[in-house]
Image (tube, rainbow, N blue to C red):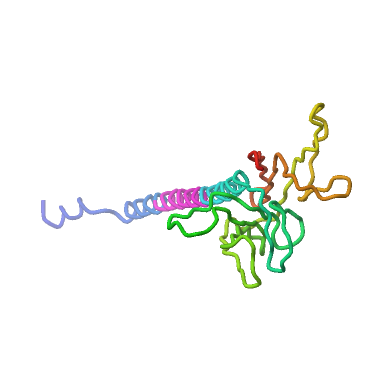
Amino acid sequence: MSKTGLLKQTGFTLLELLVALSIFAIMSVMIFGGLTEVLEVRSATNKYTTRLTELQLAFMHISRDIRQLSNRGVRDQFDSSLAALEASEIGQYKLELTRDGYPNPAEFNRSSLQRVAYGIEDNKLYRYRWKVLDRAADSEPVKILLLNDVTGFNFRFLESNANAITGQGTNWVTSWPSQVNGAVTNTLPIVIEVTIELEDWGRFTRLFDLPDVI
């Protein structure tokens, strides 16, 4: 057999090349589609995990502050008296309180108490803290961002005006300090309900019992 005849027998025909290219194109599309789907799932999972971590950290901050509540009022930058716990649906700070456990590793000559607050700015939940308890006119809080896309941040307080014998007289209120028969009470609630509403995930509610505060 001549060399020319051998080459003709071992080469690919045009039809075989077209079939091979078609199979390669189909497999490439399938692989690309599968890879794209995997990357999209991975991106969605990372986004979900990040969002969940942010929500858990926000509730962790709130829980620590509430559970270390101290019954110590302060004075604001206008020299007005503020209760140990303040909460209102209006104003910049939705929840403001005095907490214990302010870290002091350098052992400065200062109190272990700290004033903190929570508020919403442009649908963002922030935590504020002051370096002093009784604020001066130039006292600015240090704030950290906790959550984005927050559409609601609400509270309820379980107050106890219970009779020492019958145990009757508990009810929920939506602001603090509470009023009893028209007079502002100096007591603290026994439970605080915190609700955070997110644009993408909806509403989350947690209950926090308060320590025995004197």
User: Is residue 30 located in the magenta-colored stretch of the structure?
Assistant: yes
Residue drawn at x 59%, y 62% is: 132
- Residue lying farthest to the top in this orientation: 166
The picture quadrant where one finds residue 187 is top right
Q: Is residue 72 left or right of residue 109?
A: right
Q: Position of residue 5 (x, y in %)?
A: 16, 54
The picture quadrant where one finds residue 162 is top right
Quick one: quadrant of the C terminus? top right
Q: Nearer the viewer, residue 30 or 80?
A: 80
Residue drawn at x 65%, y 56% is: 118
Q: Nearer the viewer, residue 199 or 125?
A: 125
The picture quadrant where one finds residue 205 is top right
Residue drawn at x 64%, y 69% is: 136
Note whether 67 is above or below 14 in the view shown: above
Q: Position of residue 65 (x, y in %)?
A: 60, 49
Note whether 207 is above or below 132 in the view shown: above
* Most common secondary structure along the magenta stretch: helix
- Residue lying farthest to the bottom in this orientation: 138
Number of labels in the image equals 0
Q: Nearer the viewer, residue 97 or 122?
A: 97
Q: Position of residue 176 (x, y in %)?
A: 76, 50
User: Is residue 37 located in the magenta-colored stretch of the structure?
Assistant: yes
- Residue lying farthest to the right in this orientation: 181
Q: Is residue 33 left or right of residue 15?
A: right
Residue drawn at x 70%, y 51% is: 85
Q: Position of residue 160 (x, y in %)?
A: 77, 38
Q: Nearer the viewer, residue 110 or 20?
A: 110
Q: Is residue 84 left or right of residue 46?
A: right
The span shown in magenta is 28-47
